[in-house]
Amino acid sequence: MKDRIKKIQEYSGLSLGVFASRTGIKAASLSHILNGRNNPSLDVVMKIHETFPEISWEWMLYGTGTMLNGGNVDNVDNKPVESNIAPSPNQTNRTIFDNDSVKEEEFEDEPELDDDTDDVGDDNIVDIDVPKTVERAPSNLSETIENQQKSESEIIDSFLKSDSFKNILDTHLKAKEKSVKKIIVLYDDETYAEYSLNKL
């Protein structure tokens, strides 16, 4: 399809930048499509066909039939056409001597933007398995933090009450002749929890 889009651009007699502007496609997306980096999306094809309604859908999508609707395409490369879309305001009254003219090379190495949906192809679609039962998401951040602290607190409590912790504690305390009164757990959100050992 990229070859047919390139042929439409040549048929229009417009440079890559002007063709992109007239069709409403981002120049970087069009460049990526024409270089084979991305596949054209339905949105890109629709924009091209809206701009050039004389182009046959069948030819554009499948490459069958003639390029023009009921027309001859013998001298397509040498026949510029007028688009049915008016030039943008910054293109009117321009001359060949304007210094700020658009060059095709400017669009070759443009970085691809994340929010660019014009160049999404079928090979970019990913199937995601969604679980049948989904837990209720917390309604706000404080509820999330509270739930996290509760689960951490339960883990710490179960560890402090475990026999292995008591054995480690007894061994350590007997060797040092000291006793532990409480353990303080500091969280990264600047909160803390205190655990008294005499409550165990």
Image (cartoon, rainbow, N blue to C red):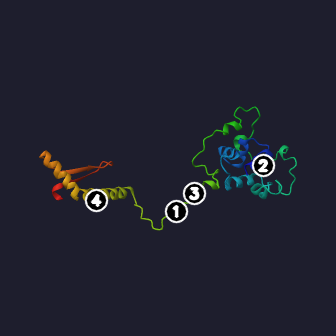
SS type, badge 3: loop
User: In this image, 112 relative to 186: left or right?
Assistant: right
Q: CA distance from mark 3 to mark 2?
A: 37 Å
The residue identified by callout 1 is: 129
The residue type indicated by label 3 comes to: Val
SS type, badge 4: helix
Classify 10 Å Cα crowding around label 4: few (below 14), some (14-19), many (20 and above). Answer: few
Q: CA distance from mark 4 to mark 1?
A: 31 Å
Classify 10 Å Cα crowding around label 3: few (below 14), some (14-19), many (20 and above). Answer: few
**Residue 9 appears in view:** yes
Going from N to C along the chain, the mark reached first, 3 or 2, is 2
Q: CA distance from mark 2 to mark 1?
A: 45 Å
Q: CA distance from mark 3 to mark 4?
A: 38 Å
Going from N to C along the chain, the mark reached first, 2 or 1, is 2
The residue type indicated by label 1 comes to: Asp
**Residue 181 appears in view:** no
Going from N to C along the chain, the mark reached first, 2 or 4, is 2
The residue identified by callout 2 is: 83
Q: CA distance from mark 2 to mark 4?
A: 69 Å
The residue identified by callout 3 is: 126
The residue type indicated by label 2 comes to: Ser
The residue type indicated by label 4 comes to: Glu
